[in-house]
Amino acid sequence: MSIDLRNTPVLVVGAGIMGAGIVQVAALAGHPVKLFDMREGAAAQAIDKLVGTLKTLVDKGKLTADAAQAAVSRMVAINSLAQARESGLVVEAIVENLDAKRALFRELEGLLAPEAVLATNTSSISVTAIANGLQHPRRWSVCTSSTRCR
C-alpha cells in the first residue's frame, strides 16, 4: 500500500531535540507543521529555537532566506491536540514509556480521521505493543534516525 503524503498537514508531538528536528525537516519539505508538547510553553520555545537554527543555516549559506522564511511560516506551536484535527500524519517523539505512548495514540484516534498515518519515533518499544488495542493498528508507521518512515 502506498500513501501520498505530499503537502499533508503534519503534527509532531514532543518538543525535545528529536521532535524539533522532525518539525524542521517537515517544514523545509513543504508541510504545514504543528508542534505539541504537554509542557506549557515547550512547543513555542522549540519553534523559537528552530527560527534561530534556520537563520544560522542562512548565514552559513546552506539555506536561502526565502526557504527559511517559508519553513518558518509553516511551523505553529499549539497547546491542545484538538488544534491539529486536520493532520494527516502524526509523528510522536515523546518519552520512551509504553503507557504514555498508548495513551497519546488513543487520544489521537478520537481526534483524527481514520486514514491519518500515525508514526512513532521510538527507539526501544515494540510498535506492535504501542498499537495493540487501538482501533486502526494498520495505519502505523515507524520512523527512526536510520530509516525513513515506513
Image (tube, rainbow, N blue to C red):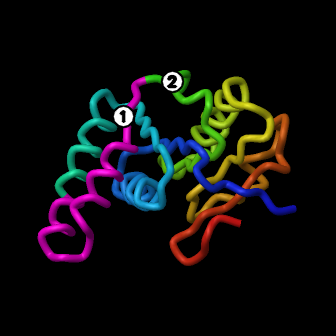
Q: At label 2, which amino acid type do we have?
A: Gln
- Which residue is labeled 1 in the image? 77
Q: Please state the horizontal and vertical placement of residue 8, each as a whole percent of the image.
A: 61, 47
For label 2, the SS is helix
Outermost residue toward the front in this view: 66
Q: Quadrant of residue 43?
A: top left
Above or below, 73 relative to 108 = below
Q: Could you say where residue 77 lies in the image, as x and y percent from the top left?
A: 36, 34
48 versus 36 height, above or below: below
Verify whether residue 93 appears in magenta. Answer: no
Magenta stretch, residue numbers:
53-79
Instruction: Assess disc 1: are there few (<14), some (14-19) or many (≥20) residues with their C-alpha within 10 Å of its C-alpha.
Output: many
| Residue 52 percent location from the top left of the image | 17, 55
- Vertical arrangement, residue 82 with respect to residue 73, above or below: above
The image shows a total of numbered marks equal to 2
The residue nearer to you, when weighing 134 against 84, is 84
In this picture, residue 85 sits left or right of residue 45: right
User: What residue is disc 2 on?
Assistant: 83
Residue at position x 84%, y 34% from top? 135
Q: SS class of the residue under badge 1?
A: strand
Q: Residue at x 80, y 35 (%)?
A: 114
User: Does the magenta-highlighted stretch encompass residue 64?
Assistant: yes
In the current view of this chain or complex, which residue is farthest to the left?
59
